[in-house]
Amino acid sequence: MGRCIPNSSLGAAGENEAAVNTRRFSRGSLAALVAISVWVGVALSEAAQAKTINVPGGKPTIQAAIDAAVNGDVVVVSARRYVENLNFNGKAITVRSTNPNSPAVVAATIIDGNQMSSVVVFRSGETSASVLTGFTLTNGRGFREIALDTRGGAVYCREASPTLTHNNISASSADYGGGVYCYLSSPTLSNNTISANHSTVWGGGLYCAGHSSPYLANSTFSGNSAGDDGGGVYCYNYSSPTLTNNTISGNSSAASGGGVYCQYNSAPYLSGNTIRNNTAVYGGGGLECNNFSSPTLTNNVISGNLATNGYGGGVMCYDNAAPILTNNTLSGNGASKVGGGVCAAHDSSPILSNTTVTFGTMGGGVYVYADAAYPSTLTLSYCDIYGNPEGNYRNWPNQTGKNGNLSKDPLFANAAKGDFHEKSKGGRWNPVTRTWVKDTVQSPCIDKGKPASPFALEPAPNGGRINMGAYGNTAQASKSAPVAPVDGLVLTAAANSVAGGVSQITVTLTSAAAVQVSVLNLAGKEVAVLPTANLSEGVSTLLWSGRATSGTKAPAGRYLVRVTARGEDGGQRQALASLSLAR
């Protein structure tokens, strides 16, 4: 139902709404007021009379119930197999099983498309108020848009944005979008299982194109396949879906993008997903981005994916692709040629930070394709590239020790069983027991992400710095190692200037502590602060670049260096050292 007064701030000749309404009412349009009152009354009456239609008790078929329903009605469907092809016809109604939260009820309430068309069609401007929940949708063959192809094996959305929750969408097929097809549509799909669907061309599980931006959450895409690209999810032509906390596993493509494929200016956002054990023939076993696509990936686990005859087992970037990967874990991916973890080719420019690329099965860790006509770049900062048997860096300079990059065993809890939480003496989350456990070793990726990255979501003690990997800045981030109470801690410090304006600060501790270094001028004003570092017992060396916090060079002269060691109990020890900065 619309508003009784148009939702506009301007009327004729730029008058504001209040002025327009005052002018109308000043002419004594009592009839208009009466009409508005009657219309509102009718709307309220319809809302009050929203009814429930039972199937098969009230209507013999689901479509008959949809046809009889008006906006606001609820169609409740009893468990059994219904051989039907449904069309919501633009109605803002809910069609549900008797208990969408019961997997047994969902499995037993089946809508069978009988290979005739899509199982359910939304093509009349449906909004989020058009809801389908609690069904198994199967055996669809897709809606035939033109004579030669079919689209949306189970679910077809064109210029519609319905809500689908708690459904099993399975064993359907189409040329485009074996499971779900979206064009100029932004449906919400949450808590669905989309499995064993097939597309002869693109998008085995889901196909979205034409500025579609579906929201996909807490769902599983598994065992879907594509005759060309995008076994699990296919994004095309300015489509930018949001994928949050999904599992995309065991999907395959006969060309590229076994798990996810992004093409032609698509910019999907992927956060908190698990993308594992997907396969593609040519490239992007886990994900391929192509043709000016720029996906953003944050806090994802991308593992065990494979390009069987090509490039980029985990992530493949091609033709001006510019993905941004922040706090992801890539592990155990492989490519038969090169780029087991990440491959950049043909003018691509992926950016990785706080990310681990480890234990590739073949093709090395990261690879940049050499092409003078179409040069690619790879930007790495605060990443751990380790344990890739054919080389951590292929055709790209080794970045270990630069820009915060490491090459150390991340000490995953149990990579073989898909647990990529980092071992910690302070505590790591065990997803099986749902408890915090302590280890005898500490991952080198803990507290080693970008100093400027947010870390507030990590549980204490968090060292004041984000972890590398998929759980950085999340509630499941592994904790910092405990530091000894400061009562028994002895701290000494010394500082001296070395070449190029860089200064070396030597810290000696009798037990491990979290240490921060501040550089002060002789008036006691703070010039620069080094990031907090967890230092072990004994002698450690830190470096100051000779630059102030603002980034400008500090002038030559004498400075004070204040070293603060903080214990887990909040107490602290301090030591001062003098420094003569040379230029």
Image: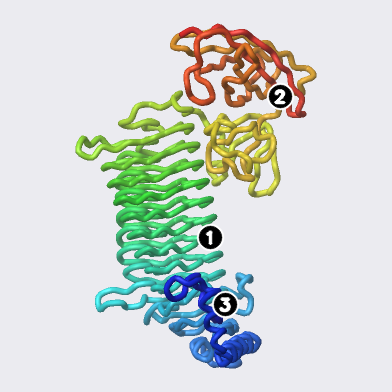
Where is residue 173? Give x, y as percent.
37, 71
Residue designated by label 3: 108
* Residue 500 image offset from top left, x and y in percent: 44, 11
Image quadrant holding the C terminus, namely top left
Please tell me whether mark 1 sits on a helix, a strand or a loop. strand
At 54% from the left and 37% from the top, the residue drawn is 453
Closer mark to the observer between disc 2 and disc 3: 2
Residue 255: name its quadrant. Answer: bottom left
How crowded is the residue under tag 3: few (<14 C-alpha within 10 Å), some, or many (20+)?
some
- Left or right: residue 411 versus residue 240 is right
Task: Kindly identify which numbered label has been placed on residue 566.
Answer: 2
Compute the Cα span from label 1 to label 3: 23 Å
Say few, some or many: other residues with alpha carbon within 10 Å of mark 1 (under 14 / 14 to 19 / 20 or more).
many
Closest to the observer: 453 or 192?
453
Which residue is at the front of the view, 87 or 407? 87
Q: Is residue 514 left or right of residue 183?
A: right
Q: Look at mark 1 in the image and give the residue it sits on.
A: 217
Identified by mark 1, the residue type is: Ala
The tag on residue 484 is: none
* Marked residue nearer the N-terminal end (2 or 3): 3
Which residue is located at x 53 percent, y 83 percent? 24
Residues under numbered marks 2 and 1 in contact, where contact means CB atoms less than 8 Å apart = no
- Location of residue 108 with respect to 549 vertically, above or below: below
Q: Residue at x 41, y 67 (%)?
A: 197
Q: Quadrant of residue 489?
A: top right
Q: Is 516 positioned to the left or the right of 232 in the image?
A: right
Which element is circle 3 on?
A: helix
